[in-house]
Every structure is written in C-alpha cells, then in structure tokens.
Image (spheres, rainbow, N blue to C red):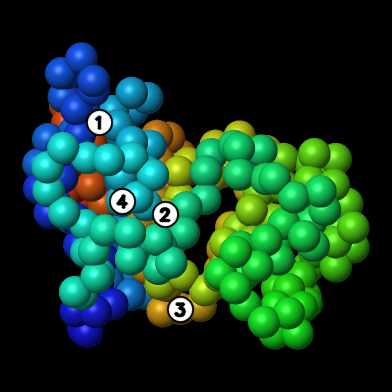
Amino acid sequence: MDSHKTLRIRNLAYSFKDGGTLLSSISLEIKAGETVVVFGGNGSGKSTLLRCIAGLLPFAEGEVTIGEKSGDTLRSHIGLVMQNPEHQMIAPTVEEEIALGLEFRGMERNEMLQRVEQVLNKYSLQELRERAPDTLSGGQMQRVALAAIAALEPEFLLFDEPDSLLDAPSRRDFLNAVSLLGQGIGMLWACADADRLPRADRHYRLAKGEAREVTVEQILQAD
C-alpha cells in the first residue's frame, strides 16, 4: 500500500484548557479504501478526535500525517461529515452549498459548474438543487452535506456519528449515498451505538482517553 495514501495518527493527545486530559497517546491508521470505526460512549472524545484529525482543533502532542504531508496541508485531503448537518450548511441553496468549497479552492468556473452537476446527478439531488438547506429533512440535509464534501474529492473522510439522528429510511438513503463514494477513499467512522455499526475493516474502542483495537464481537458483548 502506498504510504502516501495512508492517514496516520501517532500519539495524539488532547487536553482541556484547565489541564484535564481527554485523549492520551491515540495511535491508529486508515489506508486508502479502508473503513475504520472508532466506537465509544458519549463524552469519550470521538468528536474531539475527529476534529483534531481534520485540523479544526489543536492537539497538545502527537502528529497526523498522510505520507509526507502534515499540518495545514492536510485540510484539502480530509473531509468531515458532522453529526448535525445544520452545523456545516452556510449557502442559500443546495446547488450553491456544493459549489462553495470548490469556489474557495479557486476552481475555474466552468469546471466548477461541471463538477456540481456531476455531484447533483450522482447523489440524486437534482430536484433539491434550488432548495434552501434549512427546508430539507434531516436525511436530505445529511446527503447534501456528504455530497458537498465529496465534490472536493478528499482522500479521506471522517464521519462523526452521521446517521445517529436519522430514522431508518433516511439512514438507509444516507448509507446508499456513502456507498457511491470512490472505492479508494479511506473512512474513519465514529459510532456510539452498536446497532448502527457500519461495515468496517477494523474497529477501535475509545475509552478513558485511549483507543484499543477490538473485534465487532467484543463491542457487541460489552454494549
């Protein structure tokens, strides 16, 4: 496996401003095309870990790399899908939401419009293109959030319990949308509900600030 296509987290630690430690010496890796689950209860630090990896939170120790890339250079290679899609919607329409990140990247307009059209078609969002995101259902909004990030063609995607607020039909639609992502994308999926574990190549349990590799059976037995 090409090391340039492996997201590595080494000895990552995160502490609160008051000195309390939430994460201590977290080490794991996600290869291109691989899905890895981090399972843990509320307050275990899953969201914090993903935000550290995505570059949204500074961490006290450790490093996050993709090959030789590190620091701010990683932001264009990693996407984050949040639990509540309302927290990442800022454009007035679905179409503009998908175009926004491409515009920030400085993509030439004709290429940007072509990419937006491709994404709208791929994720079956054509009928929603002129809708305001805040008029959509939770499931529709989460699919738009995924599509907007997928338009940027990241190498790795982080999912912060993206289906935890969805009912069964919406969850099924969202997981179908996830299945449309390129096979070469590496995924790190945070999960707190054993009944909602996605299919994955490896699983880690996050507890007391540490991540330990476990089997699905161990998760189900302890839940």
In the rendering, at what x and y percent does residue 123 appear? 71, 68
Q: Residue at x 52, y 74 (%)?
A: 153
Q: Which residue is mark 2?
A: 158
Is residue 166 visible in this depiction of the protein?
Answer: no
For marks 1 and 3 on the same chain, the one whose residue lies earlier in the sequence: 3
Is residue 30 visible in this depiction of the protein?
Answer: yes
Q: CA distance from mark 1 to mark 2?
A: 25 Å
Query: Label for residue 128?
Result: none
In depth, the one of 105 and 135 nearer the eye is: 105
Crowding at label 3, few (<14), some or many (≥20) Cα neighbours within 10 Å?
Answer: few
Query: Label for residue 222?
Result: 1
Which amino acid type is marked by label 4?
Ile
Crowding at label 2, few (<14), some or many (≥20) Cα neighbours within 10 Å?
Answer: many
Which amino acid type is marked by label 2?
Leu
In depth, the one of 58 and 178 nearer the eye is: 58
Decide: marks 1, 2 in contact (CB < 8 A)? no
Q: Which residue is mark 3?
A: 183
Which amino acid type is marked by label 1?
Ala
For marks 1 and 2 on the same chain, the one whose residue lies earlier in the sequence: 2
For marks 3 and 4 on the same chain, the one whose residue lies earlier in the sequence: 4
Give the quadrant of the C terminus. Answer: top left
Q: CA distance from mark 2 to mark 3?
A: 15 Å
Q: CA distance from mark 3 to mark 4?
A: 21 Å
Give the SS element for disc 4: helix
Q: Residue at x 31, y 51 (%)?
A: 53
